[in-house]
Amino acid sequence: LSGLGDVFMELDQLAAARGQNEMALRLRKDIGEKETVLLTRVALARLAIEDGQSKDAEPEARQCRDQFHQDQLLDDELGAGLVLAGALLEELKTEQAKQEMVTLRPLEEKTENRQLQLRFSIEFARVLLAEHDLPASRILLDKVSKQAEASGFVGLQWEAQMVRARAQGEAGDPAGATKQLNALGARARTAGLLLLARKADATTRLWANPGK
């Protein structure tokens, strides 16, 4: 059920994704699967962020991260921490997000999960972008994009490219950034990654509607 939730999220069907994850959460609670209950709560926190409810996602992700830490489930702790950092960034709590990433760094260095490593790098680049360290953010995102492509994580590759385009726009090249985002949005729609396509379109509107 939670796997279906991921599919619906990629299709930008957030209500359907939430329904699948909430159903999975009830079933896992009934059978007492503690770890998968927490993982499903993290998935719901990610959905809350995508639905503009970062204030709800923050405490949920924090509680799950803390429990994973207590249970010494390092990869799960890292995953939940990345969701927490994302929520903090959306709430414009840049310093807290940066501190969370510093805390997560030892876990990233230990994990053998390539997807988590790439997600960590993208989130760290987003922190750099929020701090207006545009050159460092763009260099890291170029690196992550190549690594994700080599590892077969197309969605993460395109996500890195989307964040890099935002950095490009904020560095004074909105026309070039818009061109990159329009191309990325078209590829994402063709691949059925409709949430990513919507986010690319929303990023483009940052320059069409400055100050919003």
Image: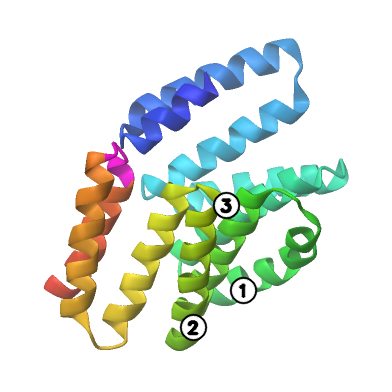
* Marking on residue 127: none
User: Which residue is label 1 attached to?
Assistant: 98
Going by the numbered disc 3, the residue's amino acid type is Val
Q: Look at 61% across and 56% down and name the residue there.
A: 82
Going by the numbered disc 1, the residue's amino acid type is Lys
The quadrant where residue 41 appears: top right
Residue 59 higher or lower than 28, as above or below? below
Quick one: SS at disc 1?
Answer: helix
Is 12 colored magenta in this rendering?
Answer: no
The quadrant where residue 191 appears: top left
Compared across the picture, whether 56 is left or right of 197 comes to: right
User: Which residue is label 2 attached to?
Assistant: 131
Going by the numbered disc 2, the residue's amino acid type is Glu
Q: Look at 86% across and 45% down and name the residue there.
A: 70
Could you tell me what secondary structure mostly forms the magenta stretch? loop
Quick one: SS at disc 3?
Answer: helix
Residue 153 higher or lower than 145, as above or below? above
The span shown in magenta is 191-195
* Marking on residue 83: 3
Residue 116 makes an appearance in the image: yes
Real-space Cα distance between discs 1 and 2? 9 Å
